Image (cartoon, rainbow, N blue to C red):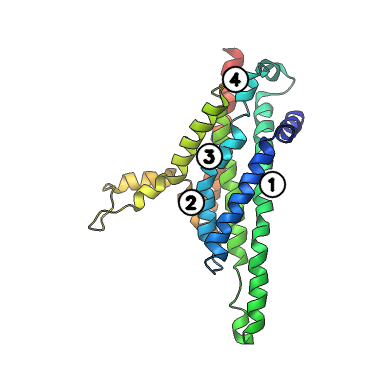
Amino acid sequence: MRAIYRKELRSYFINPIGYIYLGVFLVAAAALFYFTVLGSATYSTALYFTILVGALAVLIPLLTMRLFAEEKKMRTEQLLLTAPVTLTGMVLGKYFAALTVYGAGVLASCINFIPLYVIAAAERADETESLQSLIGPATGELFGGVFALLLVGAALIAVGTFISSLTENQLSAAVVSIGVIGAMTLIGLLTQITDADGQPWIRFAWIRTALNWVSVLGRFSNFTNGIFDFAAMFYYLSLAFVFVFLTVRVYEKRRWG
């Protein structure tokens, strides 16, 4: 698994895709942070993290579209299937390489938070001692938001990895991944739509409950409020496990089929 992990991680930066992804991610994160936090003169980062999760529907397919589709296109898939490594190790090596690049982008984007502490320090200097403790960003919200981004990314990268294993066309893998991840991310918003009378657009409560359960975004808000949600963490990790398992099953069938 280590050899495949190192090979895959290196390939992100031999090809321009790794640089393109990190550049797009960091620029998008910086722009979102400016307009939702700095431009709004607020210390609340909940909207920033929420919109960034929605942007992952486009960003993550950049990472995952080539994982297995490229192997099929280049006719190197058989080398993987006959390599002295288990199928689980092969899939995990590629999955963790994509997750490493994603995690590097998330952690690098934390530099956006520095201006909040600089502004808070300047504002505290102008306030009375009794008000100084009320000024500044909530560090718990920042840590919670970053941790949740990593969890959501782990789940969605697994989804993209599975989709990449089903096709040899990288563009097809990217388009399908955008559709699936976009639906999983935003489907919960349907439960918040109301008609002119203020009634939910979706009348059946059980349908709204099911949509909220499927929605990746629906479990995100607790983290952005500084609340550590174990149930949400279990959901994201379970989602990652299921799609990694399905990817392994695809290659088990392909090896013996």
Measured in 3D between alpha carbons, the distance from the residue under mark 1 to the one under mark 4, in whole angstroms, is 31 Å
Q: Which residue is mark 4?
A: 252
For residue 161, which numbered disc appears in the image?
none
What's the residue at 47%, 44% (across, down)?
A: 185
Tell me residue 249's x, y (percent): 57, 24
Which amino acid, mark 3?
Leu
Question: Given contact means CB atoms under 8 Å apart, are the residues at marks 2 and 3 in contact?
Answer: no
Question: Given contact means CB atoms under 8 Å apart, are the residues at marks 4 and 2 in contact?
Answer: no
Measured in 3D between alpha carbons, the distance from the residue under mark 3 to the one under mark 1, in whole angstroms, is 21 Å
Mark found first going from the N terminus, 2 or 3: 2
Mark found first going from the N terminus, 3 or 1: 1
Question: Given contact means CB atoms under 8 Å apart, are the residues at marks 3 and 1 in contact?
Answer: no
Q: Is residue 9 left or right of residue 219?
A: right
Tell me residue 257's x, y (percent): 56, 12
Q: Is residue 125 above or below residue 18?
A: below
Q: Secondary structure at mark 4?
A: helix
Q: Which residue occupies the foreground of this view, 201 or 148?
A: 201
Q: Secondary structure at mark 2?
A: helix
What's the residue at 42%, 45% (across, down)?
A: 213
